[in-house]
Amino acid sequence: QVQLVESGGGLVQPGESLRLSCAASGSIFRTYAMGWYRQGPGKQRDLVATITSGDTTNYADSVKGRFTISRDNAKNTVYLQMNSLKPEDTAVYYCNALINTILYWGQGTQVTVSS
């Protein structure tokens, strides 16, 4: 069983930045493919960014150039640096891990972008 714990959400104004963190349990974190998804009010859960064990990244078009996903295998943590935040980025952000075809999810962290 893998546990994922997100942190770093909050209330910010448009144009500001936040960094989300997702700490994962397990001794082979470096082999996990990790991702961030988000679910806005009344919307489905959508992909934000993913990173493979080999550090290949992929981003949703809506966040390209503004968000950066990274990982620190020594800390079992994946990050999502979010810059130039917009009101439409408001959502609950979820971390996930794909391990041997099983997808694990964290509990989510709220990000609100509002003036």
Image (cartoon, rainbow, N blue to C red):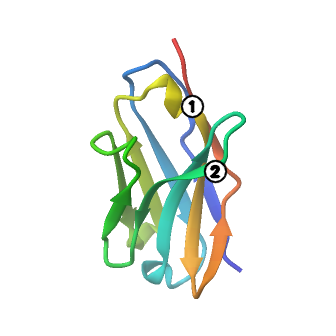
User: Which sits in the foreground, 113 or 60?
Assistant: 60
Res. 61 mark: none
Kindly report the distance in space between the C-alpha atoms of the residues bearing marks 2 and 1.
12 Å
Callout 2: 10 Å neighbours few (<14), some, many (20+)?
Answer: some
- Residue extending furthest toward the left: 65
- Residue extending furthest toward the top: 115
Q: In which quarter of the image is residue 99?
A: bottom right
Q: What residue type is labelled 2?
A: Arg
Q: What residue type is labelled 1?
A: Thr
Residue 56 placed where, x, y %?
30, 70
Name the residue: 51% across, 28% down.
88
Q: Quadrant of residue 58?
A: bottom left
| Residue bearing mark 2 | 45
Res. 90 mark: 1
Residue 60 placed where, x, y %?
41, 51
75 is higher (above) or lower (below) than 17: below
79 is higher (above) or lower (below) than 82: below
Name the residue: 43% across, 50% down.
80
Nearer the observer: mark 2 or 1; the answer is 2
Q: Quadrant of residue 96?
A: bottom right
